[in-house]
Structures are given as C-alpha cells and as structure tokens.
Amino acid sequence: MLGPVEVLRGDTTLELGPRQRRVLLTRLLIEDGRPVSLGEICRDLWQGSQPPGVVSSVRAHISRLRSVLDPMRQGRSQILTNGPAGYALKVPREARDTVLFDESVTRAREAVSRGQLEVAREELDAGLSLWRGEALGEATEHAFAAREVTRLNHAQQDAKELQAAILIKLGDVNRAISIAESLTVSVPLREDAWALLMRALYGAGRSVEALQQYESFRAMLARELGLDPSPGLRDLHTAILRHDTAVLGDPRMVRSTTLLSTGLGNVAEPLVGRAEETAHLAATLQAAATARTQWAVLTGERGTGKTRLLDEMAVQAEAAGFAVTRISGNLALTEGRSIGQVCPITQLLDDLRQSDTPAQDGVDEAPLTVLLRELGQEPRLCVIDDLDWAPPEFHALLRQLTAFLRDVPVAVVCALQNADDSVTGGLLADLARHGATWIHLEPLVVADVAELLTARGEDASAEDAALLHRRCEGNPFILGELLKLPPGRRTGPAARVPVSIHRIVQARLAELPTEVRAVLASAAADGESLDIDLLAGVHSMSRERLLPLLDVAVTARVLTWDADADEPTTGTYRFLEMYREIVLSTLTPSARQLLHAALARELTRRGNAEPAWLARHLRAAGPMASAAELAAASRHQDAGSALVSIPTARRLIPGPRENGSVDL
C-alpha cells in the first residue's frame, strides 16, 4: 500500500485487474477488517456521480477479487467476506506494508531511547525501503483515502527526519545532507528539515552553505507567511556563526520546531479584556503563597489567549518569588527553545530534579514520590498547557497529586481547549471536588478592541472598532494578525485576509472529506449564513445526510453554530467572515460560476426565493446560467425586474436580437 497497491503471493505479483477494482481493494484494506456497506462502497468509488448499474459493477469486482485473493476456497470465502453490515477484507495485519512500516519506526524510536543508534538506523532503513511511491496509489484522489494518506505521509516525513538526525549522530553527514535536502523540497515550510540540513552541512565542514540555507528559509518564510524563523532555528544559526560546539554537538532529534512562549519576555501588545481572569489567577498565587495548595483550570478555544494569559501569570509569579515550571501535554520546550516529543511526566520530573534536594541513593523512586517531595521545597507555579493532549498516565498522576498534595506553597494551572472532553473528565471532576478555580476565556468584545486600538496609538472611531471586531469575532489571535496589516486593509472593500490565517484555514480545509468541502463551497457562494434546505437541494441529499457534514466543519472550526438565545436547540450555521473569503479563494472562476448556477436553479425550482437573492446568483453565474433558467426566474418577478438588467443575461439567451436585447 506504500505506493501503487499490489498483492503478492510469495514472490508473485497477482493481477488485480482494472483501476476501479484496485481502488475497491484499497477501500476495504484501510478498514482493517471492518465491514463496509455496499452503498458506502458505491458512493466512495464513484464519489457522488454513480452511473447506472453501479451495484452490479461492484459485485462483479468483488467476485473477481475473491477469485484472485482466495482461489482455493471451497464455499464462502474467508478472506473477502460478506455479511449484514457489508463487505470485509480479512487480511493479517503483518501482511500489510503499512503496518510493517509503522512497527519499524516504533522499534527505531525505542532503540534511540536506549541509545542504540545503529539498531535504530537499520530499522528506519528497512521501514523506509518499503515505500515504492505515493501511499495508496490510485486511491489518493478519493475522499475515503485522504485521512490515511495524510497520516502515512506525515509518518514518512517524521521517519526521514529521525533518520537524518541519527545519521548526523553517527557521523554519516553526507547521507544526512541528501535526506534533509529532499525534505526541504517536499515539505518546504517544515523547520525541522532545514535545521537538520544546517546541522549536517556544518558537520561536513560546509558552514557557509549552512548559513546560506538559513537565509533561504528565512526569506521564503517572510515571503510566504510574513513570519520570522523560530527562536530555536535562530539559535542554531547563531551557534553556526560562533562555532558553538556546545549547541552543535547535539542534533536534538525532535519532531517539530514550533515554539512555546517562554512567558518572560516583553509583550508587544497590551493584554485587554482579561482583567477578571487576571484577578482570579493573581488570587490563586496569593493563596498558594500562604502554603495552601491551589489548582486552577483555564479553558478556551484556540486563539483565545490562554498562553498569553499564562505568560502574564508566570511573570507575576516570578516577581512574587515563585519558581516557575512550564510543561506541555504533548510538547517539551528544549534548551534551544524548540519543541520535542517528550512525555509531560518526564518534563515535570526533569525540571524539579534540578533542585538541590538529594535523591534517594540506589532507589528507583516512583514519580509521585518525587513530586510530593520536591514540590514542597519552595513556592512554585506549575503551568500545564495542552492538558487535553496529555497521555492517560499523566492524567492519572495529576489525580494522585490532587489527593496528596496539600498545604504546600504550590499553584498548579491546567490549560486546555474543552472542559467537556471525555479524555480529561476524570481529572477535572477531581479538581472540581477539591475546589479548583475555573476560568473560561470568552471572545473579546467591541470595547476591548477599541481599548487595544487606543493603546496602540491608533485614532480609530467606534465604527472602526466594531468593524474590526466583526471581522475577527473577538478572537485575540485573529485580531492580532489583522492589526499587522495597514488600517485600510483590515476591513471594508480593500480588506485582506492575513497570510497566517489563510494558511491555517487552508490546512483545516485540506483535512476535511471531499463531500464536506463541496458543501462548504456551495455555502460560501451563497452567503455567510447557511440555508440548509437550499444546500440539501443543490447536493441532492436529505437534511439528515447534510447536517452531519456541517457538524464536521464546525468541529474543524471552519463553520460556527449560533444558537438562538431563546431556544438553544435551534440556531444557524454560518461562516466567520474571513473563513468564507478563504473558501471562495480556493475556487476557480468557472467553479464559482457553476456553483452560482446550481444555486440559481434550486432557487428557481423552489419558486419562493427573494428576487434580489436569485438575481445575485444569476448575475454571478455568468455564461453558466441558461436561457431557460433566466426565463423561469423572470416569471417570479415584475416586468421591470432587475433580472432584465443583468449585463451577462443578454449574452446567455440563444438567438439574441441584433441590438443585444432579449425577450424574457
């Protein structure tokens, strides 16, 4: 499956037949033995436009596959089975190269943790040698394969980065250079690849080229995203300039160079709209200073400013004499200020063990024992970010701490996105029973935006603040990105979408199933708020089928759900203003015209659409709107309808008069 899909019996490659049959085989393989219904197979293979006789075609392909995969069967096949839930392919896990690859990478990481670099290199070489091309071959264009293709591609990139890092450690820098160079081409915005290339070049005595690679990446990052390289990469650049072997001697085999804020530097923008939350956190510190252990839970969606608020608390804590420990549920801040994949328990223990308290000689102490001993030594603030990403064993350790950590000058603040997540449910219940402080970050209000503009010295009116608030909808991160633009580009007809926001939303869209993206495109063409019945009609599906697709987009934070104030169970799906613009920007002009034409046809069929609404879609449909549609639409309007004045309409009716006019 790591390339064009093949089936081998011994050394013989089996003949699978035409492309559609190979795609069907892939569809069954990625389910890992779970059944797939006949209807789902038809939809996935033909992606919505099913030709006549599609069911018979699928059954014929199934029969042919059975004869190839299980030629010696007597009676019902035990490999390609059929039951009430659908068809299932029963293939041993070890018979799939995707499983073999994953297991090789896992063994390599375990070997690295034991210091067995040669073993790790051999495992990675074996795993990566299984790749023969693009994962899942001809199925890559199908929506059902998107998630698995993305997972496998990311796993391959991670494995190659680990391979290059190991080769640098082993001194095989020329091979490491080759691998790192290929990574900078295939994933040009991934900093790890550039960091590895710079290290390998320096190790080969080519420090000038290493510095040139940094400048190439810095220029591309500024051009594409308007960003600077991370502090981790800048530190590496400085180390190469200074030939700092203390830094360059450690390749830092990490998987990401995204940055965590240290919380101790000067903040460019004032913190607005968070006075109440800041007061709660300050009270938590004051209570902890009196030797009463305090717990706090900080929740909020991405971009609401959790990390920024924790930065402010860390500064206050240090000023009050607290030692500050900051860890992440899924990422660890390394000495180079980049992020490594380190267990949060290890992060916490490593930080606390830097104290002067001697460990018990010859005793392998349990983590809880170490924490209970070390945390009472001095006033300390423990900040745990991304708690919802932490593994179960870390949650279990924190639950033990809530029971035993009492009457010591410690404040523990846990930050996460969603307090209703079942993953953290047990821990949060324990914290509630122990009187934890709960803080939820709501979006900023218009007054907060006005305050920030004033603090920046901008002469902005109340209307300017309101327009800016509407565009960012109170999200502090989006607001900050908008404020990097010139005032005339933030709102109004000349408004632009910040490159960073554009990239983030594009990445979210790429991860959505094809069917969801198609619905979002139609919705964006129609307007900011979604008309469920209109979209269901355009895509020929029931409301029951459509609504789960919209919920997928809400989960991905491309759409939002506005509940009615009086009846929370009802409401409206809608786009954030900029998100709709981004969805539309992914469409070609002809694709937009086709969408507007489809929307106009459905509105005409319904017969009760507002004239201006229908006219807008017909105007935007351009040459894709037919004469029949224009004529049918005109029956719902007065003789003086705006439709007659649509400029493109005169070109759309077959057989126009010589003066270009038309009869509707």
Image (tube, rainbow, N blue to C red):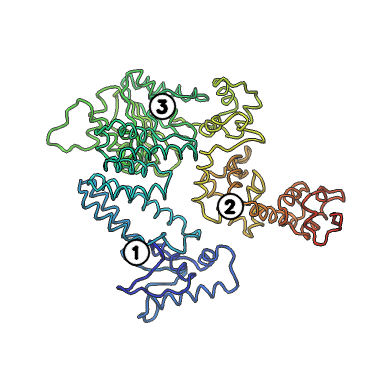
Res 96 label? 1
Image location of residue 275, percent across then percent down: 49, 22
Residue closest to the eye, 107 or 493: 493
In this image, 615 relative to 210: left or right? Answer: right
Quick check: 370 above or below 632?
Answer: above
Residue at point 47% right, 67% down?
23
Task: Identify the image quadrant of residue 2.
Answer: bottom left
User: For the image shown, how many numbered marks are present on the structure?
Assistant: 3
Instruction: Estimate how packed mark 3 is, as few (under 14), some (14 to 19) or many (20 or more) residues with alpha carbons within 10 Å.
Output: many
Secondary structure, mark 1, is loop
Label 2 or label 1, whichever comes before in sequence order: 1
Q: Residue flagged by tag 3: what amino acid is it? A: Asp
Pointer 3 with pointer 2, Cβ within 8 A: no
Q: Nearer the viewer, mark 3 or mark 2?
A: 3
Q: Residue flagged by tag 1: what amino acid is it? A: Arg
Residue closest to the eye, 18 or 558: 18
- Which residue was labeled with disc 2? 547
Image location of residue 547, percent across then percent down: 58, 52
Residue at point 56% right, 31% down?
485
Q: Nearer the viewer, mark 2 or mark 1?
A: 1
Image location of residue 302, percent across then percent down: 48, 37
Residue farthest to the left, as pictured: 362
Residue closest to the eye, 425 or 617: 617
Instruction: Estimate how packed mark 2 is, as few (under 14), some (14 to 19) or many (20 or more) residues with alpha carbons within 10 Å.
Output: some
